[in-house]
Amino acid sequence: MSNYRPQFLIPNNEEDFEDLCADVYGTIFNCPNPSKYGRRGQAQHGLDLVLYRDGINSDDNRIGVQCKHVQKLTFDGKHGDSFIKELQKAEKGQQKISKFILVTSLPSDARLLDKVNKLSQARLDERKFPVEIHFANDLETKINSSKSLSERYLLGKNYEI
């Protein structure tokens, strides 16, 4: 007998995806009040969410999250959505962060992950904040790994049979 794990359905639009990310990462980092950084039309400097690890708002506990509900994402492409473009915006922004996470609605991409991990190590060597990329299946794993998140997202109507 195999263990059944419901598959999580990614929201259909950017706003719902951002709300999902706020809830998931707020839970993961024990941030009771994840903040949406601005709104559509405002300069967000590469950040959609600002989280405070363990609810402590300080430079070394502040995490910046960029949510990308996209059809395509490159590492450093000149056109369209790219990891490097969002990171550069975050570096120039007002928020001092200890980590940058780009969360995408796309499935895992080994080449993209390899490039981001290599960049993160180089940044750490330069005493800069680390960077991460999380994919849709990573979100699903995080939801499945948390009792409170799985109760919210997997026991309702948001799953496939």
Image (cartoon, rainbow, N blue to C red):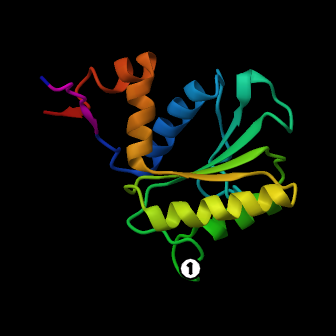
Which portion, as a residue range, is magenta? 2-8
Furthest residue in direction bottom, as rendered? 78
Horizontal arrangement in the rendering, residue 14 relative to residue 48 (left or right):
left
Horizontal arrangement in the rendering, residue 39 relative to residue 19 (left or right):
right
**Which image quadrant is residue 22 in?**
top right
The amino acid at mark 1 is Gly
Count of numbered circles on the image: 1
- Which residue is labeled 1 in the image? 77
Q: Is residue 39 above or below residue 73?
A: above
Can you give x and y, in whole percent of width and height, for residue 30 in the image? Answer: 64, 22
CA neighbours of label 1 inside 10 A, class few (<14), some (14 to 19), many (20+): few
Question: At x 35% / y 17%, what residue is drawn?
Answer: 151
Can you give x and y, in whole percent of width and height, for residue 75 in the image? Answer: 56, 71
**Which image quadrant is residue 51 in?**
top right
Q: Secondary structure at mark 1?
A: loop
Magenta span dominant secondary structure: loop
Question: At x 59% / y 67%, what residue is drawn?
Answer: 115
Question: At x 21% / y 25%, what residue is drawn?
Answer: 3
Can you give x and y, in whole percent of width and height, for residue 142 in the image? Answer: 45, 33
Q: Quick check: is 6 in the magenta stretch?
A: yes
